[in-house]
Image (cartoon, rainbow, N blue to C red):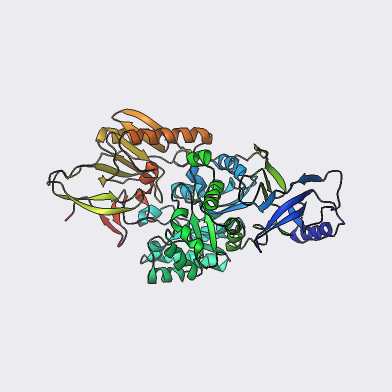
């Protein structure tokens, strides 16, 4: 049925000439446009869309009409997570969907760089296929694959190939573009400009990533046509971007939790209609123990944000940003019937969730079965470390080291190994190409805290490298060998013994196992690392982010250290 015919039928339903499929009566409707909670309302639904919202509880009915009595409870639009990374769960899309449904999220916009980095289009195409025909709506953004150096961008698709994805209605635009990569001289920066131009020509969004940018750099970056940013971590940073016309996404998820730091914003006399609450990813532990976007929303309510503002931030604001507000984000005629039923405005506890007119959750039970899409065999063999010898490290003189400032932020440290106590808390860090190409680099890292053994990952951001942090060569080689055997994931080993691990053989990023098993193995890994001296919250995320240009200031690749301010590739020896 085409769009015109669909809307004609909705008109007839609203006029009382055609029977509804479902009618919800006696509900308190939250109107996202006026921020009103309107009591004693009815919603008429036909073919997955809303035909009528108002006080009339008596539509035309048939013997198949489903009548839902809301009994005064609040009716909200389905929640929209405007920026996330489904791959951060380490699970397949069907597992993600199953655990997201009870919280009331009916639309998700996800980044896609994980399998794209691992296998190019062979990874991207099946990943996207799994988003289709799920009980909830999944949109995606296609990644520009911004790496630390050109060697990390080997699997970049051509502009023509990426344009094919940008033309897909399920693709809402270019994924987060790191501002520092945009300004790289030569072909790397030119490539991003070309992709951005194509996206804008097609009417798609460009998702921003402005961590560390301010003043003229931020203004210059904005000239690219970037529409949003999820990186502000202070009230002033949020305001600076709002004043430039950005849609600002406040993160509250597993990687960063910003609500507490920016809560003062909501006491300011500013317009909140360009504010969005997003997760930017939630891992398996947090989803199962805390929840998904609903956990972030509840925290916002606990912090005293008005429910009317909070609910706009996870519905109509997100929809308007992506130009989807004629379809989702509101309980209004013509929109998709994505509805969440909660007890009261201040109590977000979903009792019923509907997506496109189908009830997918009710009274504690998920009623829809997500669709599992198998991945091709080639994606189960992407971890192929070539034989290598662990490089030697200087035993004296001045050396460079990655110095952890926080669990995510690093700086360049210069250490004189001849000074007493210089080796305290100093560990080795190895980056080795794991995609079947040569390349390895061994350096130093300080502040990780590990007292024994080694831990390694193939989950590293924006790279095809495997990264291992450890105190002795035997443990580090054990980790590399075991990650090769499991085809990816995490491994913690002491000498020749594997203490804890999580296998993610799909592209080195995902597992077919149930999310509950993934959660248990993640917790076992984190517990083992804490017992051996690592104090950082979510230490595996600390390990994974050592390779990304998204976070300042000093990173690592299989070619050497990389200093972000000038993209210099540096050796261990400091002159």
**Residue positioned 63% across, 40% down in the render:** 370
Say if 92 sits above or below 116 in the image.
above
Foreground of the two, 227 or 243: 243
Spot occupied by residue 312 in the image (x, y as percentages of width and height): 60, 59
Q: Quadrant of the N terminus?
A: bottom right
Q: Quadrant of the C terminus?
A: bottom left
Does the rendering let one see residue 336?
no
Spot occupied by residue 193 in the image (x, y as percentages of width and height): 45, 67
Left or right placement of residue 278 versus residue 325 in this view: left
Foreground of the two, 24 or 404: 24
Spot occupied by residue 483 in the image (x, y as percentages of width and height): 38, 36
Tell me how many marks there are.
0
- In which image quadrant can residue 145 be found? bottom left
Say if 15 sits above or below 458 in the image.
below
Left or right placement of residue 396 versus residue 479 in this view: left
Left or right placement of residue 412 versus residue 501 in this view: left
Spot occupied by residue 82 in the image (x, y as percentages of width and height): 55, 55
Does the rendering let one see residue 372?
yes
Say if 301 sits above or below 526 in the image.
below
């Amino acid at each position: 049925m085409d769009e015109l015919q669909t809307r004609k039928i909705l008109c007839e339903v609203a006029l009382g000439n055609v029977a509804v499929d479902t009618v919800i009566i006696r509900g308190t409707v939250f109107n996202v446009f006026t921020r009103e909670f309107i009591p004693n309302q009815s919603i008429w639904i036909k073919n997955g869309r809303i035909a009528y919202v108002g006080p009339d509880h008596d539509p035309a009915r048939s013997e198949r009409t489903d009548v839902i009595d809301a009994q005064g409870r609040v009716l909200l639009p389905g929640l929209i997570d405007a920026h996330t990374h489904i791959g951060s769960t380490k699970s397949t899309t069907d597992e993600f969907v199953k655990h997201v449904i009870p919280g009331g999220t009916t639309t998700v916009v996800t980044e896609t760089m994980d399998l794209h980095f691992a296998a190019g289009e062979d990874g991207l195409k099946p990943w996207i296929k799994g988003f289709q025909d799920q009980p909830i709506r999944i949109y995606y953004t296609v990644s520009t694959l911004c790496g630390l150096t050109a060697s990390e961008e080997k699997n970049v698709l051509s502009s023509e190939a990426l344009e094919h994805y940008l033309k897909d209605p399920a693709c809402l635009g270019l994924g987060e573009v790191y501002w520092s990569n945009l300004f790289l001289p030569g072909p790397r920066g030119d490539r991003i400009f070309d992709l951005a131009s194509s996206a804008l020509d097609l009417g798609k969004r460009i998702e921003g990533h402005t961590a560390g940018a301010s003043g003229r750099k931020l203004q210059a970056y904005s000239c690219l046509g970037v529409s949003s940013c999820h990186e502000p971590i202070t009230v002033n940073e949020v305001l600076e971007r709002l004043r430039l016309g950005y849609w600002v996404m406040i993160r509250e998820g597993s990687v960063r939790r910003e609500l507490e730091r920016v809560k003062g914003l909501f006491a300011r006399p500013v317009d909140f209609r360009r504010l969005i609450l997003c997760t930017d990813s939630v891992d398996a532990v947090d989803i199962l123990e805390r929840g998904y976007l609903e956990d972030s929303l509840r925290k916002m309510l606990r912090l005293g944000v008005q429910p009317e503002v909070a609910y706009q931030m996870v519905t109509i604001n997100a929809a308007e940003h992506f130009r989807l507000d004629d379809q989702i984000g509101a309980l209004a005629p013509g929109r998709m019937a994505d509805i969440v039923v909660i007890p009261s405005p201040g109590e977000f506890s979903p009792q019923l969730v509907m997506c496109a007119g189908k009830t997918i959750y009710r009274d504690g039970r998920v009623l829809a079965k997500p669709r599992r899409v198998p991945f091709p065999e080639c994606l189960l063999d992407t971890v192929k470390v070539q034989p290598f010898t662990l490089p030697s490290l200087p035993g004296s003189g001045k050396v460079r080291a990655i110095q952890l400032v926080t669990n995510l932020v690093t700086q360049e440290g210069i250490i004189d190994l001849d000074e007493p106590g210089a080796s305290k808390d100093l560990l080795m860090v190895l980056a080795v190409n794991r995609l079947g190409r040569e390349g390895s680099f061994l350096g130093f890292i300080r502040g990780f805290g590990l007292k024994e053994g080694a831990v390694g990952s193939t989950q590293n951001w924006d790279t095809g490298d495997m990264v291992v942090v450890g105190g002795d060569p035997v443990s580090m080689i054990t980790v590399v060998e075991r990650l090769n055997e499991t085809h990816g994931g995490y491994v913690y080993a002491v000498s020749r013994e594997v203490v804890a691990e999580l296998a993610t053989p799909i592209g080195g990023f995902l597992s077919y196992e149930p999310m509950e098993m993934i959660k248990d193995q993640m917790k076992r890994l984190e517990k083992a690392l804490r017992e051996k001296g690592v104090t950082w919250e979510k230490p595996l995320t600390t390990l994974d982010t050592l390779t990304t240009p998204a976070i300042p200031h000093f990173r690592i690749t299989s070619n050497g250290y990389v200093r972000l301010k000038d993209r210099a590739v540096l050796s261990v020896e400091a002159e």
